[in-house]
Image (cartoon, grey):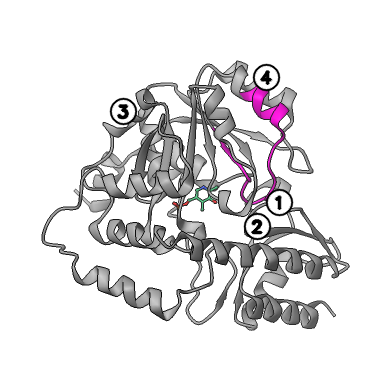
Amino acid sequence: MSLSSRLQKVLSPVLKDIKAYKVQPSTGMVKLDAMENPYTWPEEIHQQWLDVLKDVHVNRYPDADGTHVKAELKRVMGISDEYSVLLGNGSDELILLLMQGVLKPNATILAVEPSFVMYKHIAKTLHLNYHGVDLSADFDIDLDTTVSAIIKTQPAMIFLALPNNPTGNIFSDEKLKAIIEATSGLVVLDEAYTAFTEYDSQQWLAKYEHVIIMRTVSKIGLAGLRLGYLFAHHRIVNEIDKLRLPYNINTLTQATAQFILSHNDMLDQQTQALCAQRTLLMQQLGDFDVFECYPSEANFILVKVDEARSAIDIFEQLKQYNILIKCLDGGHPLLVNFLRFTVGKEEENQALIKALSDILH
Ligand SMILES: *Cc1c(COP(=O)(O)O)cnc(C)c1O
């Protein structure tokens, strides 16, 4: 039997519908594409970290429950003791575990669009029904359409990112309340960008037991660690925890997270610096006539390019200047001719503005 007939026979039919998550090559480039924190650590803290790592032994399995990391996250992130915490290898893994938790024939996942692409991708890999409800042209929730979709599809789980990626906005309390109350399923509030906003979803968790809050340390300077966390009612967390593979958070990640969370003030300062840069960058991008900038409560800025210019061309030309951003064109009908700029450090943002001045003059 040829390999192709063998694969044809055995492979899951979903593989025909999905593509591997593609990361753009970025060696040597100014990276303004992936919402990473651009700052490194002061020499002294770097040295202390290396000292911690000296005493870490990788011959043993990690702490299976991540007890210390959970306690440190609770303390530093102000998570109430009444909730249980679950750790994931990035919040991407948590999305997978959450969806596995509601996996059964005909179960539906609902999300608004455009939003974080992994909701749809992971739902598809699991053979779950995925229902995307379009946001309005100004990227707000269309409440009537959304509530009708909830009533019609009876989703087992709804995903909402607050602030939303790639649009940068937070939906109104009124709309969130209506959605949370309309569903008989679970609601995951994805706060990947919580560090960059005053907004805090814990109010929803305090009121509704079927809400789950999910966060990550990726956007506050620890993307390489792969550490996400969620917190919710212990009955929910206990069920999802059954699906977690043993030792999903490796020893180096646990030791590093524990160490650096005790220096949370430094991470906070970096976040504050990025928020200041966001204000400046927003203003400078807005000065280009062909750009329309959307308000952002995250560490990126969504920009609509006037039809006189092509977002794809600008994206390609920026690469000639060694600057990598995200071109959203082609991702969703509402994002035709849109770009997304991650806020970088001052010199990176200024290199971007200078390159754009050349390109758009
Ligand atoms: C970046 C991002 C994530 C994934 O974070 P990881 O912890 O790095 O897997 C989840 N949700 C949203 C909305 C994001 O933008």
Q: Label 2, label 3: how many angstroms apart (C-alpha)?
A: 37 Å
SS type, badge 1:
helix
The magenta span reads 159-179
Q: Are marks 2 and 3 in contact (CB under 8 Å)?
A: no
Q: Label 3, label 4: how many angstroms apart (C-alpha)?
A: 31 Å
Q: Are marks 2 and 4 in contact (CB under 8 Å)?
A: no
Which residue is drawn at the image coordinates 46% and 50% (left, top)? 216
- The numbered mark, 4 or 1, whose residue comes first in the sequence reads 4
Query: Mark 3 highlights which residue?
Result: 238
Q: Is residue 177 magenta?
A: yes
Q: Nearer the viewer, mark 1 or mark 3?
A: 3
Left or right side of 259 for 192: right
- The numbered mark, 2 or 1, whose residue comes first in the sequence reads 2
Percent x, y for residue 285?
Answer: 78, 68
Q: Which circle marks residue 328 in the picture?
A: 2
Query: Mark 4 highlights which residue?
Result: 148
Instruction: Looking at the picture, tell me which residue is in the foreground, 104 or 177.
Output: 177
Query: Mark 1 highlights which residue?
Result: 335
How many tags in the picture? 4
SS type, badge 3:
helix
Q: Nearer the viewer, mark 3 or mark 4?
A: 3
Percent x, y for residue 105?
Answer: 39, 21
**Quadrant of the rendering where the C terminus is positioned:** bottom right
Which amino acid, by three-letter code, is at mark 4? Ser
